[in-house]
Image (tube, rainbow, N blue to C red):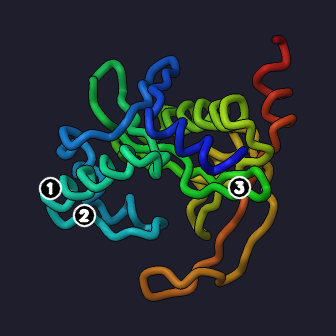
Amino acid sequence: MKEKDVVKKFKRMPTLHTARLTLRKMRPDDCADMFDYARRDDVTEYLLWEPHPNKNHTLKYLEYINSMYKNGEFYDWALELDSEKKMIGTCGFSLFDFTNNSAEVGYVVNPVYHGCGYATEALIEIMAFGFMELNLHRIVARYMDGNDASRRVMEKCGMKYEGCARSSMFVKGKYRSVHTCAILSDEFIKRYFKDE
């Protein structure tokens, strides 16, 4: 996998579909839906970013993201719940390691929709895209100490726990331990494409 190939793929951000979700580009008209969860302290507790202070902040962020899409430099999808035509979160690639043919994934879902399996559904689709379309060898996900719900999503998708980097990240005034889970291409294919 080469960087230029990834840029080319994401310049025309592909739309993906699951049983209940459409994964698509974020748009400025998602502002109200995104602000609905991005303003919440409980959503950002285990993330690197702070709650959005107002809708104008969210709108500016979405406008910035759209400029990144045009350059093929942003790899996160909006999760649109088909039954409500509402953006309920995001899921995508946060980092590529082109030398080692791997990538890191991340996801956020509005707490109103927690417990419905949407994060798992979206993450499986993103990982399938990574392995089948980008020919990745390995996909990694990380979570901060205490975010057990995020680990459960990773494990439901077939990721294996690999370890903890103790007090490795200084976030929001304190040191946080960061845990890593990962899955390899052959493990994913065996799990989800074994009958093909």
What secondary structure is found at the residue carrying circle 2?
loop
Residue 86 in the image: state x and y as whole percent.
28, 31
**Residue at the spot of label 3:** 98
Could you tell me which residue is drawn at 79 percent across and 34 percent down?
188
- Would you say the residues marked 2 and 1 are in contact, meaning their CB atoms lie under 8 Å apart? yes
* In the displayed structure image, the side of residue 37 where residue 28 appears, left or right: left
Between 134 and 141, the one nearer to me in the picture: 134
- Would you say the residues marked 3 and 1 are in contact, meaning their CB atoms lie under 8 Å apart? no
Q: Quadrant of the C terminus?
A: top right
Closer to the eye: label 2 or 3: 3
Residue 28 in the image: state x and y as whole percent.
21, 43
**Residue at the spot of label 1:** 55
Q: Earlier in the sequence, mark 2 or mark 3?
A: 2
Q: CA distance from mark 2 to mark 1?
A: 8 Å
Could you tell me which residue is drawn at 29 percent across and 66 percent down?
51
Q: CA distance from mark 3 to mark 1?
A: 36 Å
Residue 11 in the image: state x and y as whole percent.
45, 39
Q: Quadrant of the N terminus?
A: top right
Q: CA distance from mark 2 to mark 3?
A: 32 Å
157 above or below 168? Answer: above
Could you tell me which residue is drawn at 59 percent across and 80 percent down?
169
90 above or below 192? Answer: below
Q: Amino acid at mark 3?
A: Phe
What secondary structure is found at the residue carrying circle 1?
helix
* In the displayed structure image, the side of residue 5 where residue 190 appears, left or right: right
Residue 52, label in figure = 2
